[in-house]
Amino acid sequence: MDEPLISASLVFRGDGTPYSPRHDDIYHSAAGALAQARHVFIEGNGLPERWRGKSCFSVIETGFGMGINFLATWAAWRNDAYRTATLDFVSIEKHPFSANDLRAAHAAIIDDRAVAPLADSLAAAWPPLEPGLHRLAFDAGAVTLTLALGDAAQLLPRLADHGVAADAIYLDGFAPAKNPDMWTPAIFASLARIARHDTTFATYTSAGSVKRALMQNGFAYRKVAGFGGKRAMLVGKRSFHGAS
Ligand SMILES: C[S@@+](CC[C@H](N)C(=O)[O-])C[C@H]1O[C@@H](n2cnc3c(N)ncnc32)[C@H](O)[C@@H]1O
C-alpha cells in the first residue's frame, strides 16, 4: 500500500527564493529558477541539439518541485523548429504542492512571458494529490508529463520494472547533505536501468557522494561550470563499457 502523501508548504526566504523548511534548503538558485533550469538541466544534457533527428525524446527527473525544469524544457522544445514529434517527461515528487501553491509559486518566480502560459496549463491540469502515477497531456498530446507522486526509492524501481526509458536524466533532489535519500546508490542503480545506451544526465551538485554513486552505477561524469556562483556541476552519460 502506498503511504498517504504529505504535501509541501510554500515558504519564501527573505530574498524571494522558495525554501523547504522540511529539508532546510532552497528549491532553486537565488540567481534565477528558469535560468538555472536552462544552464544546468537543458544545456547540461546537450539540449536542444540532442533531441534533433529523433522522433520522440524522454526525460526523467528526480524531484518535480514547482515544475520549473519541466516548464523550461517544454518551452525549449516548443521554441525549437527541429523538435521531436513528442516529448515525454516523467518526474518523481514525494511532497507535491497544492494547485494553489503551485500557482502562487509560479506567479512569484516565472519571469518569462513564453513560460507563463505553460505554467497556467500545468496548474489547470494539476492532479489530486494521491500517491502513484498521474499522466497529464499538453499541446494536443505531443507533450506528456507523468507525475510519479511518492518516494523516489519506491517509485524508481517500479518505473524501471515497467520499462520506462529515458534519453536524459535531471538529478534535482535537494542538496545531498540535506536530502540524502534522493542520492543513494539504489537511486542511481534504478536510473541505470532506466537509461538507454546514449542517455545523458546533469545535476547542479558536484558532491563526492554523488560522484561515487554515479561511478558505481556505470555513469561517467565530467565537472563543468556551475550556475549562479557555483564553481562546478556534473554532467555525463551512462557508459556501457563497449556495448553499442
Ligand atoms: C530542488 S527541489 C526540485 C525542484 C524542481 N525540479 C523544479 O524544477 O521546480 C527537490 C524536490 O525533491 C523532492 N524530494 C525530496 N525527497 C524526495 C524523495 N525521497 N522522493 C521524491 N521526491 C523527493 C522535494 O519535495 C522537492 O520538491
Image: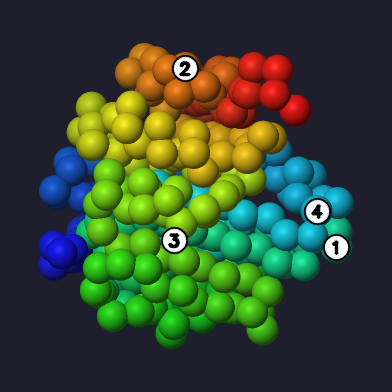
Task: Count residues near mark 2 (Cα–Cα under 10 Å), then give few for <14, some for 14-19, many for 20+.
Answer: some
The mark nearer the N terminus, 2 or 4, is: 4
Residue bearing mark 3: 67
Q: Looking at numbered disc 4 in the image, what kind of residue is underneath it?
A: Lys
x and y percent of residue 178 in the render?
21, 33
Measuring 35% from the left and 79% from the top, which residue is drawn there?
127
Q: Which residue is mark 4?
A: 54
Q: Nearer the viewer, mark 2 or mark 1?
A: 2
Does dot 4 land on a helix, a strand or a loop? loop
Left or right of 130? Residue 155 is right
Few, some or many C-alpha atoms within 10 Å of disc 1 (few <14, some 14-19, many ≥20)? few
In screen coordinates, is 188 left or right of 11? right
Question: Residues under labels 2 and 3: Cα distance?
Answer: 28 Å
- Name the residue type under label 1: Ala
The residue sitting at 79% across, 60% down in the picture is 55
* Residue type at tag 2: Met
Identify the secondary structure beneath mark 2.
helix
Is label 1 in contact with label 3 (beta carbons under 8 Å)?
A: no
Which sits earlier in the primary sequence, circle 1 or circle 3? 3
Disc 3, SS: loop
In the rendered structure, find residue 215 and report the number of the disc placed on it.
2
* Location of mark 1 (residue): 81
Q: Using residue 65 as the reference point, say whether residue 195 is left or right of it.
A: right
| Residue 45 in view (yes/no) | yes
Q: Is residue 72 above or below residue 140?
A: above
Comparing marks 4 and 3, which lies closer to the viewer?
A: 4
Labelled pair 4, 1 in contact (Cβ < 8 Å): no
Question: How far is the residue under mark 1 from the one under mark 3?
Answer: 23 Å
Q: Check disc 3 and give the amino acid type.
A: Gly
Give the CA separation, mark 4 to mark 1: 13 Å
Q: Quadrant of residue 118?
A: bottom right
Q: Is residue 40 visible?
A: no
